[in-house]
Image (spheres, rainbow, N blue to C red):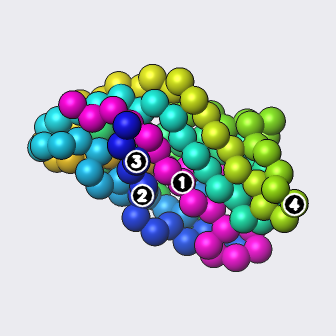
Amino acid sequence: MFKITPTSFPVDTAAYALGDCIGGKLTIANAARRNSGGGEIRSLKLVDQANQKKAISLVLFDSDPTNTTFTDNGALDVNDTDMSKSLGVIEIAAADYRSMSDNAIATLKNIGIGYVLDGSRTLYGALVAGEAITYIASTDLSLALFTNRD
């Protein structure tokens, strides 16, 4: 099992609406051992320091979706030409979180999304608000994916 995390993605403290991109495009390095390698996403951990516990989707791509604009706190509209790069969506429901008094954590297991990267060792993604969310600080969210890399 190998832990991969996206580059820093500060979140906006203004309200997100349903369908808004949270933090912009995610770049997740070292998702494969070699260029054009692959693996399988086994589990996910999302830490919510603001204890919002809101539904969020994680959209993943096997190569850089360069034709799509990922604007933090703007509606995500994946360009048609980038849809072939999509690996799928991981849904994090409000019920997946566990509160720890003033923060929360969501852990999803047995995800099982396989991937083969297109010419690099990097996955790309975007977090998408599943409902209205307002965070307190730009550092309120952190994400980790746990994979088996080939």
Which span is picked out in magenta? Answer: 126-150
Numbered tag placed on residue 101 in the rendering: 4
Which numbered disc, 3 or 2, marks the residue closer to the eye?
Answer: 3
Q: Are marks 1 and 2 in contact (CB under 8 Å)?
A: yes
Furthest residue to the right? Answer: 101
- SS under mark 1: strand
Residue 79 picture quarter: top left
The quarter holding residue 41 reads top left
Write down the residue under mark 3: 3
* Secondary structure state at the residue bearing disc 2: loop
Q: Amino acid at mark 1?
A: Leu
Residue 57 visible, this angle: yes
User: Which residue type does callout 3 highlight?
Assistant: Lys
Image label count: 4
Label 1 crowd (10 A; few <14 / some 14-19 / many >=20): some
Which residue corresponds to mark 2? Answer: 6
Q: Is residue 108 left or right of residue 118?
A: right
Give the residue number, with chain letter if any, for mark 1: 143
